[in-house]
C-alpha cells in the first residue's frame, strides 16, 4: 500500500470523503480506494485534487521535496525559519528545558506567556511538542543565538533538540527505521527510496561509511569502536524523539515512556484548548495516557507537572484521525 497525503489535506479542509469525491467527479468508494492507497490516482484526477486542495501533486502523493529548517532566511515560511532557542527554568527541582524553535513558535510562545493559559504549548524543530505548565515556570529565556554558548546558566543546559528536522514525513521514516531495527524487517517500502536514504544519512553512519572515514584518516583505527558507540548513542537519541513521551514533574523526577500505542492528540488536546472539553469546564482533569491499551495506562495530575513532551508527528497523525472520525460522523447523519 502506497502512503499518500490525501486524508491529511481532506481533513484540513474539513471535508468528508463524499464531499471530496464530488469535487473530484468520482464516487465515494472510488475516492476511498485512492486515499487508502489501494488504487493509484489517475493523473487527470490527481491534478484536479491538487487544484482543489491548493497543493502540488507531489505534496498529495507524499513525494514533495523535504521541508528543512532555514537559518536566518527571511524568505522562508515562519514555521521553518530558525529563530534560535528558548530555555525554561522551573520553580521546582527539575532540569531546565532547552528547545530549538522556529520564528512561528517564538511568536506564539511569546504571546501565550503573556496570557492566563494554564499550559504554554511549544513546537520545536526536532519533533517535540511540549506543554509547559505556566505556573511552574520561574524564568523563560528566548535567544536568537544558540544556548550552548549563550544565555543564563548555559553551562548546565542539555539541548532537547538534537537534530533540526521539521518535516513530519521524515519522522515517520525515522519511526519506521527504528521498528525495522528492532524486528529485522523492512517497513520502509511505503516511502520513496531516496527519502529513506536521505533520512538514514541524517541520523546514522553505516559501517561502510565508517570504513571510508578510517581509510581517509578521519578516524584512527584504534578509535573506531569508541566512535561507533558514540554515533550509535546519537542515533538512538534521535530515534527516541519519534516514539517517546517525556514527563517532568515539579519534584524534578522525569519519566520516559518509550512505547506509545494510542492517539496522542487526545492526550494533549485538553492542554492545548482552553475550552476543552466544551462543557463549560475550562480546566483539564487528569491527563490520560493509555500508552499500551488495557495493559498499561498512566494518569498524570496536570498541577504536578513541569511539562509533558510528545512526538510532533504523532500528534499530527492523531489530530487527522480524530477530525476524520468527526467528519465521518457528520457524513453518516
Image (tube, rainbow, N blue to C red):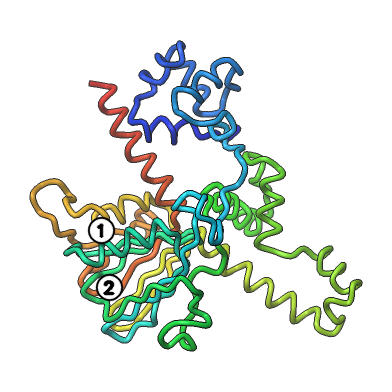
Instruction: Looking at the picture, tell me which residue is in the foreground, 178 or 131.
Output: 131
User: Residue 83 at x, y = what percent?
Assistant: 46, 64
Q: Quadrant of the C terminus?
A: top left
Which of the 4 image quadrants contains residue 188? top right
Residue 281 as seen in the image, left or right of residue 232: left
Q: What residue did someone put label 2 on?
A: 305
> Hey, which quadrant is residue 53 in on the image?
top left
- Residue 92: x and y in percent read 28, 84
Q: Position of residue 220 (x, y in %)?
A: 85, 82
Residue found farthest to the right? 215
- Mark 2 is surrounded, within 10 Å at the Cα level, by few (under 14), some (14 to 19) or many (20 or more) other residues, namely many
Which residue, as the protein is rendered here, is positioned at the far front? 74
**Nearest to the observer: residue 142 or residue 243:** 142
Relative side of 305 to 72, left or right: left
Residue 290 placed where, x, y %? Answer: 34, 56
Foreground residue among 183 and 20? 20
| Circles 1 and 2: CB atoms closer than 8 Å | no
Identify the residue at image location x=46%, y=29%: 54
Q: Residue furthest left?
A: 280
Which residue is under mark 1? Answer: 271
Quadrant occupied by the N terminus? top right
For marks 1 and 2 on the same chain, the one whose residue lies earlier in the sequence: 1
Q: Secondary structure at mark 2?
A: strand
Q: Which mark is residue 37?
A: none
Left or right of residue 286, residue 28 in this image: right
Task: Please name the residue shown 34% across and 59% down the image.
Answer: 107
**Which residue is depicted at the point 55% across and 30% down?**
56
Amino acid at each position: 500500500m502506497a502512503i499518500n497525503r490525501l486524508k491529511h489535506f481532506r481533513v484540513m479542509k474539513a471535508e468528508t470523503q463524499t464531499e471530496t469525491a464530488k469535487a473530484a467527479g468520482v464516487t465515494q468508494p472510488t475516492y476511498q480506494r485512492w486515499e487508502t492507497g489501494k488504487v493509484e490516482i489517475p493523473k487527470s484526477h490527481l491534478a484536479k485534487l491538487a487544484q482543489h486542495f491548493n497543493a502540488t501533486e507531489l505534496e498529495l502523493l507524499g513525494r514533495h521535496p523535504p521541508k528543512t529548517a532555514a537559518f536566518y532566511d527571511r524568505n522562508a515560511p515562519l514555521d521553518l525559519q530558525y529563530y534560535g532557542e528558548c530555555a525554561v527554568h522551573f520553580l521546582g527541582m527539575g532540569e531546565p528545558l532547552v528547545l530549538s524553535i522556529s520564528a512561528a513558535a517564538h511568536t506564539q510562545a511569546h504571546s501565550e506567556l503573556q496570557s492566563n493559559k494554564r499550559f504554554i504549548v511549544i513546537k520545536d524543530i526536532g519533533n517535540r511538542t511540549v506543554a509547559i505548565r505556566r505556573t511552574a515556570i520561574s524564568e523563560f529565556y528566548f535567544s536568537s543565538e544558540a544556548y550552548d554558548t549563550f544565555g543564563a546558566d548555559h553551562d548546565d543546559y542539555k539541548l532537547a533538540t538534537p537534530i533540526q528536522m521539521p518535516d513530519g514525513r521524515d519522522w515517520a521514516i525515522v519511526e519506521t527505521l527504528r521498528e525495522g531495527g528492532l524486528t529485522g524487517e523492512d517497513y520502509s517500502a511505503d516511502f520513496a527510496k531516496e527519502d529513506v536514504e536521505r533520512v538514514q544519512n541524517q541520523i546514522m553512519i553505516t559501517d561502510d561509511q565508517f570504513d571510508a572515514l578510517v581509510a581517509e584518516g578521519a578516524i584512527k583505527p584504534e578509535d573506531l569502536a569508541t566512535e561507533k558507540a558514540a554515533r550509535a548513542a546519537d542515533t538512538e537519541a534521535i530515534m527516541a524523539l519519534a516514539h517517546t513521551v517525556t514527563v517532568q514533574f515539579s519534584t524534578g523526577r522525569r519519566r520516559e515512556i518509550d512505547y506509545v500505542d494510542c492517539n496522542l492528540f487526545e492526550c494533549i488536546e485538553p492542554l492545548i484548548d482552553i475550552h476543552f472539553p466544551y462543557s463549560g469546564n475550562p480546566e483539564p482533569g487528569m491527563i490520560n495516557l493509555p500508552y499500551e491499551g488495557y495493559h498499561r495506562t498512566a494518569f498524570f495530575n496536570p498541577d504536578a507537572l513541569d511539562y509533558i513532551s510528545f512526538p510532533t508527528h504523532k500528534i499530527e497523525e492523531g489530530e487527522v484521525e480524530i477530525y476524520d472520525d468527526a467528519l465521518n460522523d457528520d457524513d453518516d447523519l
